[in-house]
Image (cartoon, rainbow, N blue to C red):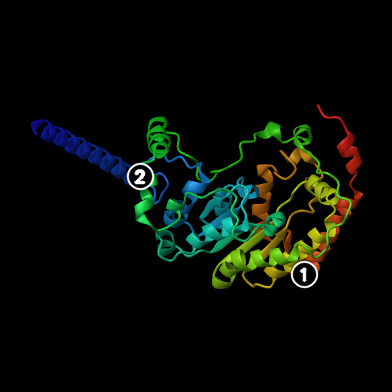
Amino acid sequence: MKKDGFAKKLILIFAVIVALMLSVISALVIYVDPFFHYHKPLSGFPYVVDNQLSQNPGMARNMTYDSCIIGSSMTVNFHTDDFRELMGLNTLKLSYSGAYPRDDYNILSIVYDDSTLARQTNDVKAVFMVLDIPTLTAATDEIKYPLPEYLYDKNVLNDVKYLWNKDVILEYIFRPYIQKRPSNMSEIYASWWTEEYYNINYVMHGYEAPEKVEEEMDPGLLIPQTKINLEENILPFIEAHPETTFYVFVPPYSILYWNNVLTENHLEATLNQYRFAASEFLSYDNVRLFYFQNMEEIVTDLSNYADYTHYKPEINRYMTECFANGEHEVKSNEQFEHELSEMMRIVNDFDFDALLTAEYY
């Protein structure tokens, strides 16, 4: 009996010690809060921000901002300091690499949550959103990567996945505290490509042309899913928030993107998809639409790219200047049709055979 009592006492002591350790760990994570799940950043702590899936929701809730950048990797090289300089906006980058429309929906749902510290501090003056046409045919509930739901929902019980997370403690609390190298919030999520990667040789060595498709796609095939995606994931926010200006932009993919479209034989279907999406956005007074694909000197020069779609950070700066001064803005369906015609002139004049058959070192 004495042995049984001693064993029970040891178990109780062990349980108390474990509970105390978990409580201390929880308190540390809540105090520092490297994913900004509970509160705004502590003054002076060297936060590292490099995890879009885990840190975006907390930043959207608890950072101080009056505008945000959302969308795919086409947005990661924007510098938010440029938006402050050129437009007087305190902008937060909330990009998701490879984002589908549902990813935009998920983060905008948090951005516009009136119960958050962010919304109690500032209204949303502007949202800068990339229009990646190919993603509009995704399933309306499809996301690029599985989300850590415990950081997106309001269920406090599953927060233990955050509070007792080894990586959170070691990589986002201890390492930053020791190294004292905080992220530059203006440049978070920027692509790893450095200047030497932006050249035609690197692009062409990494480019794989798709297999040729002989039968042309039905010109109207892409419209129904595009319509559903816009109506379920994007347009409700535009309709519900007339106080916000939505800067929607078509990014300058390189000329190789159009080689894919031609090779896969869906040119007319893709053009119709662009027309439809543009028409939808142009019907709202609080949307400003920008078309950057027909900048001939940019899209035909592969030294501006690291692959067939991703462009230099300098181009992000130029697009920010355009948001400020209105260059490349499209204000009507007729003007958008003109921009598409100019894009098709560039495509028709371009010598794809010479590009694809040349040798690259």
Name of the residue lying farthest toward the top: 361
Looking at the rendered structure, the kind of residue marked 1 is: Asn
**Residue drawn 78% across and 40% down?**
302
Q: Secondary structure at mark 1?
A: helix
- Few, some or many residues within 10 Å of mark 1 (<14, 14–19, 20+): some
Name of the residue lying farthest toward the left: 2
**Residue drawn 49% across and 64% down?**
112
Nearer the viewer's eye, disc 2 or disc 1? 2
**Residue drawn 40% across and 44% down?**
34
**Residue drawn 13% across and 34% down?**
4
- Relative horizontal placement of residue 275, taking residue 216 as reference (left or right): left
Name of the residue lying farthest toward the front: 1
Number of marks: 2
Rendered location of residue 197, percent (x, y): 70, 33
Could you say which quadrant of the image residue 247 lies in? bottom right
Q: Nearer the viewer, residue 100 or 40?
A: 100
Q: Is residue 218 above or below residue 301?
A: below
Looking at the rendered structure, the kind of residue marked 2 is: Leu
Q: Are marks 2 and 1 in contact (CB under 8 Å)?
A: no
- Res 244 seen here: yes
- Relative horizontal placement of residue 328, taking residue 5 as reference (left or right): right
- Relative horizontal placement of residue 119, taking residue 286 as reference (left or right): left
Rendered location of residue 22, percent (x, y): 28, 41
Residue under numbered circle 1 = 333
Rendered location of residue 1, percent (x, y): 9, 34
Of the image marks 2 and 1, the number of the one nearer the N terminus: 2
Residue under numbered circle 2 = 163
- Distance from the alpha carbon under mark 2 to that under mark 1: 51 Å
Q: Quadrant of the C terminus?
A: top right
Could you say which quadrant of the image residue 322 lies in? bottom right
